[in-house]
Image (cartoon, rainbow, N blue to C red):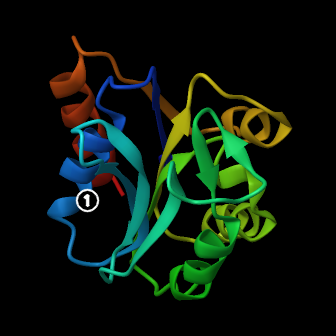
Amino acid sequence: MASKEIFITGLPHCGKSTLLNRVIEGIPQKQGFVTLEIPGDDGQRSGFKIVTAKGTEAVLASTELDTPIRVSRYSVSVENLDGVIPELSEIKPGDVLYIDEIGQMELYSERFKGLVRKFLDSDNIVIFAVSKIYSDEFIQSLLSRPNMHLIEVTSENREESYIQIKQLLSQK
């Protein structure tokens, strides 16, 4: 049987999130979250929010938060991320599981890492967007998993990447 694990990676602004959103939008039975930019009043990005499959929203990081965890100019709210983990842990057989993204901000949460492991330990298909610019032991362990499919997205191959993922999903 083909691998049930699809990892999408690429540089910032290459289209990983857009690609993942496009893939999952037509899937009726799914569980996971995407991370969306929060626009500021000046038109610049002021942070990121998580939006779950059920529509729950939580601010992951913002220039307007005051937390001890900082990534670039953003304060990260591990508490907000941890708050949606119980909802995300409700996995049904047949759900396509997805996370956008596994990166530096999310990896401050041990509960998040536990969720990633739970998704991988399930019998379900998983699709993860994984940071290309940040790496640690956890990310390296994911990228070294046997039989996973790693798709590197660039501005030039976005459509081909979409077709490749759809083909992988149709093999399941």
Residue extending furthest top?
156
Query: In terms of secondary structure, where does tag 1 sit?
Result: helix
- Say left or right for 127 vs 102: left
In the image, residue 27 sits, relative to residue 127, either above or below, namely: below
Q: Quadrant of residue 71?
A: top right
Of the pair 55 and 74, the residue shown nearer to us: 74
Residue 126: % across, % down: 49, 58
Query: Residue at 24% across / 48% down in the picture?
Result: 41
Of the pair 76 and 115, the residue shown nearer to us: 76
Residue 45: % across, % down: 34, 40
Of the pair 140 and 171, the residue shown nearer to us: 140
Query: Residue at 42% across / 25% down in the picture?
Result: 12
Disc 1 residue type (three-letter):
Ile
Which residue is disc 1 drawn over? Answer: 24
Query: Residue at 30% across / 40% down in the picture?
Result: 165
In the image, residue 8 sits, relative to residue 95, either above or below, namely: above
In the image, residue 168 sits, relative to residue 21, either above or below, namely: above
Query: Residue at 69% across / 38% down in the picture?
Result: 146
Q: Quadrant of residue 154?
A: top left
Which image quarter holds the C terminus? Answer: bottom left
In the image, residue 5 sits, relative to residue 172, either above or below, namely: above
